[in-house]
Amino acid sequence: MIEVKYGDLNFDWCVVLNFHKKAGEKPTYSIDVLAHLTTDSVLQKSTSDLQPCPLTEKGEMKAIPIQHTLIRDAIPIQHTLIRDVSAIRVYLPDDLRTKEARQSVLKSVQEIKRRHPLGLPLLDPIKDMDIKSKEMAACVKQYSTLQTRINEHPLTKTPELTYLYEQYERKANFERQVVEAKNDLKKAQSLLQIGDLKKFKRVLRRLGYCSSADVIDLKGRVACEIDTGDELVATELLFNGVFNDLTVSQACALLSCFVFQEKANEMPKLPQELSGPLRLMQETARRVARVSIERNQL
């Protein structure tokens, strides 16, 4: 016997008749069961219209076709709808085509439930199925431990458990949506960065930092070592020999322009030995900016 639940519909304990395996990368199983349903839903042809019979109604057992010569109607269910599997077996009549035969099975199920008011004994994979796998034994032990912790948790005794669980599930759903939105944002940003990267490659090729095959040349390797100030302008000054004839103090004064952040209303008057290198640096910066603008517009 198996306990079946589909969404909010609890079909309680059903009697297993047969199962079917559908091959594929991820094999799926469907199980044929004998279920206690409302009298109206038994007449429905679609399995989606089936309704479990409340305890206050008589209802009728709905049979499932294994072979057309044995059983009429069909109620195949997916294995994912199974909540529990009981160790109890129900002996079935040889022919389930008659209503009387199916109702006799219902009486057997009701008697079994009457004898086990605390719940039907569940199938033990170690004792009942004789599975000797160490991995299975570890899983069963872990399941038993977790089930005990769940039963002992204070929330299981609160009448608001269903409401609290729905609120938690709603929160978890929102958190998943936030994660998905962040991932979508990262993908969008990556697409924008790809466009910027293509433009920057055109600038590097134009200035001679990489080849037409995007292989980094000597100028490019030098620029990679500069992490303060504008790498392209500094590299251009190096390869144009601007620092060759400068003293240490003049070179330091020129390099200070790359990290200078102070604002001044008036431009100080510079001596000739400094104004010349400064003019070269400004011209180099303008050329780099001009190439960047031209290539970004392509």
Image (cartoon, grey):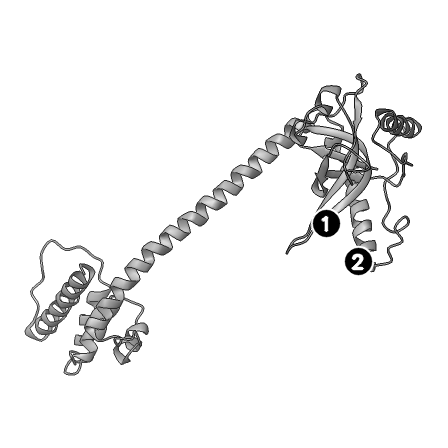
Q: How crowded is mark 1: few (under 14 residues within 10 Å), some or many (20 or more)?
A: few
Residue at left offset 89%, top offset 53%: 130
Residue 146 in picture, x, y percent from top left: 77, 44
Residue at left offset 18%, top offset 75%: 237
Tell whether label 1 touches label 2 (CB within 8 Å). no
Residue 16 in picture, x, y percent from top left: 82, 39
Residue at left offset 20%, top offset 57%: 262
Q: Which quadrant would the C terminus be assigned to in this image?
A: bottom left
Q: What residue type is labelled 1?
A: Lys
In this figure, what is the number of numbered marks? 2
Residue 10 in picture, x, y percent from top left: 73, 29
> Is 185 placed left or right of 55 in the picture?
left
Quarter-of-image position of residue 268: bottom left
The residue indicated by pointer 1 is 21
The residue indicated by pointer 2 is 135
- Label 1 sits on a secondary structure element that is strand
Quarter-of-image position of residue 285: bottom left
In this rendering, the label closer to the viewer, 2 or 1:
1
> Is 250 placed left or right of 6 in the picture?
left
Q: What residue type is labelled 2?
A: Glu
Disc 2/disc 1 C-alpha distance (Å): 24 Å
Q: Residue furthest bottom?
A: 244
Residue 143 in picture, x, y percent from top left: 78, 46
> Is 133 placed left or right of 245 in the picture?
right
Q: Which quadrant would the N terminus be assigned to in this image?
A: top right
> Is 123 placed left or right of 232 in the picture?
right
Residue at left offset 20%, top offset 73%: 207
Give residue 67's mark.
none
